[in-house]
Amino acid sequence: MKKLNLTKLVLVTSLSLLLYNCEKNTDDILETDVVTTQNEVPHVCIEKWNNDEGKMEKGASIKTKQWKSGQTIRVKFLNGNNFVQSKVKQYAVEWENYANIKFEWVSSNSSANIKIGFREGQFANDSGSWSYLGTDSNNSSHSMHFGWFNNNTSDTEFRRTTIHEFGHALGLVHEHQNPVAGINWNKEVVYAYYAGAPNYWSRSQVDNNLFNRISASSSNYSDYDRLSIMHYPVPAEHTTDGVGVGRNTQLSATDKSFIARIYPGDSNPPNDDICEGVAEYNQYNYYVEGDKVTYQGSLYQKRTGGWNNLGTCGSNPPADICEGVAEYNQYNYYVAGDKVTYQGNLYEKTASGWNNIGACGN
């Protein structure tokens, strides 16, 4: 069992990115992740459109930019270290749990549909995060970018931004421009806010990036969803009714059902039993760390120091062992049995230290 000392569990959660208008050309659609508290750092997300597309033709998803249901989408990294690449892989595949698509991760010298860059080398000056919409990715040699990821980025931020940008890559646009979005904008306040630093947007840019909603005929869309991973925060003071939108960091129930509707098919049939295919414990067998057995109606996994009970046979396997588990906080007091996430893994507190239960996403 891998041990983790508390003194080494130090998470760096602050980022130093400054918001700026990184619109590449007049046909780019820029959206801003606005600051919702004084301590938050604003991040930029850009929806990129091919030049022949009208700016108003966008919605919850764009019909003409969706991939074929059941398609394998090839993805490659143009740069980035192994750690940041692994985090993108870890969270991008959450879409596969609900959409009938498959991401195939290929080498950097292979042909691919989605091509991902990080802020280094030839892309060192691009501090934004963005993605081309859907099949538009095919037409760009650099179709997705993560401008603020590094080895100190929190798992929450890796998850939030990765799932969001891969939502764009599947053809989804920002939820606040859903045809039936119900935001009661305080327009003069919003105009004044974005007219200042660091955006310096004109009123028409604010209209295009925030207020304009798409026509229902050009899109597939669901009921407006304030909890969508595709929705950016809206401060309460930017609305006339004082109803804001918080920072969404994971797929909502509507995100899951909607992506399944536009990419239909049983691409990932559920496993109804976590014990399916696992042999019963045999006292005469030799087991090593990671082996699984069933015993008296439960599933167990061999770990250093003993066996971990993973649940009762007949139950559905969890989509993610880290789901609902908070990240480690050096200022919290933990007791035996407490669980935390740290650098993409789930840990459990024991009397002698921290046990690594496994990688998040399993």
Image (cartoon, rainbow, N blue to C red):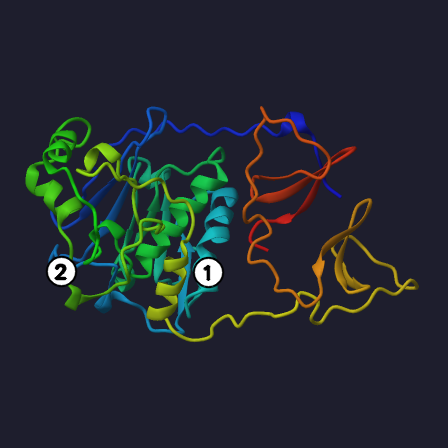
Task: Find residue 122 and report its horizontal and vertical position in percent.
Answer: 32, 41
Q: Which residue is mark 2?
A: 53
Q: Which residue is drawn at the image coordinates 21% and 53% (left, top)?
A: 181
Q: Which mark is residue 273?
A: none
Q: Secondary structure at mark 1?
A: loop
Q: Quick one: label 2, few (<14), some, or many (20+) residues within 10 Å? A: few
**Residue 336 in which image quadrant:** top right
Q: Is residue 124 left or right of residue 352?
A: left
Q: Earlier in the sequence, mark 1 or mark 2?
A: 2
Q: Amino acid at mark 1?
A: Val
Q: Of discs 1 and 2, which sits in the foreground?
A: 2
Q: Amino acid at mark 2?
A: Glu
Q: Is residue 100 left or right of residue 67?
A: right
- Residue 107 can be seen in this image: no
Q: Which residue is mark 1?
A: 106
Q: Which residue is drawn at the image coordinates 61% and 62% (left, top)?
A: 317
> As rendered, which of 303 and 315 lies closer to the eye?
315
Task: Find residue 328 and report its horizontal and vertical position in percent.
Answer: 58, 34
